[in-house]
Image (cartoon, rainbow, N blue to C red):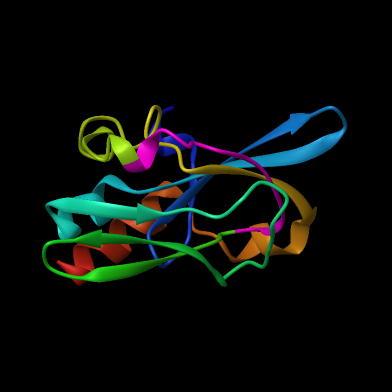
Amino acid sequence: MNPEDLLFAETHEWAKVIEENGSKVATVGISAFAVEQLTDLVYMELPSVGTPVEAGSEFGEVESVKAVSPLYSPVTGEIIDVNSGLPDSLETLNSDPYNAGWILKVKITDESSLGKLLDYAAYQKQCAEEG
C-alpha cells in the first residue's frame, strides 16, 4: 500500500478503507514514523476476531525496549481479521509497515469515525511537528 493513499489517526495508526461485500472494511496498522519512534520492538498484544472497537479506544499494545505503547483503533466497528503471525515477527513492522505489517481488519459500523482521520499531508505535518 502506498502511504499517500491511507488515512491516519493522530495516535499514528493508519487505515486503508475499501468496500467489501457491501460493507466498508478498514485494514489497520501503525505508521513507519511510529515504528521508528518505538525502535526495538519486543512484544505485541492483539485482540480476538469478533471484538468490537471504538474509534480512539485501545485495542492492544506494542512494547519496545523503550516503552509500552497502546494501540488505538482509528475506526469504529468489529474486528474481522487479525494478522496473527505478526507478534512472532515484529521485524515486519520495520521492513514493511504498510503491507505485510498490517495488524487487523475492522468492518466499519460507524462511518463518522473516518471524518476524524488525517490525510497523508496532514499526518506528515504532525510528524514533523513531533520531531
In the image, residue 120 sits, relative to residue 99, either above or below, namely below
Indicate the position of residue 13 as horizontal and vertical percent values.
Answer: 43, 55
Indicate the position of residue 73 as horizontal and vertical percent values.
Answer: 55, 61
Indicate the position of residue 130 as horizontal and vertical percent values.
Answer: 21, 70
Residue lying at the far right of the rendered structure? 22
**Residue drawn at the location 29% of the way across and 30% of the way down:** 96
Judge from the rendering whether residue 2 lies leftward or rightward of residue 110; answer left or right.
left
Q: Quadrant of the C terminus?
A: bottom left
Q: Quadrant of residue 2?
A: top left
Indicate the position of residue 47 as horizontal and vertical percent values.
Answer: 55, 55
In the image, residue 25 sits, relative to residue 108, either above or below, namely above
Residue 77 falls within the magenta-colored stretch: yes
Asked whether 17 or 29 is in front, the reply is: 29
Q: Quadrant of residue 71?
A: bottom left
Give the residues in magenta.
Answer: 75-87
Residue 129 falls within the magenta-colored stretch: no
Judge from the rendering whether residue 11 lies leftward or rightward of residue 47; answer left or right.
left
Judge from the rendering whether residue 56 lies leftward or rightward of residue 44; answer left or right.
right
Judge from the rendering whether residue 120 lies leftward or rightward of residue 33; answer left or right.
right
In the image, residue 2 sits, relative to residue 26, either above or below, namely above
> How many numbered discs sit on the rendered protein?
0
Asked whether 127 or 49 is in front, the reply is: 49
**Residue drawn at the location 48% of the way across and 53% of the way down:** 46
Q: Quadrant of the N terminus?
A: top left
**Residue drawn at the location 61% of the way across and 51% of the way down:** 48
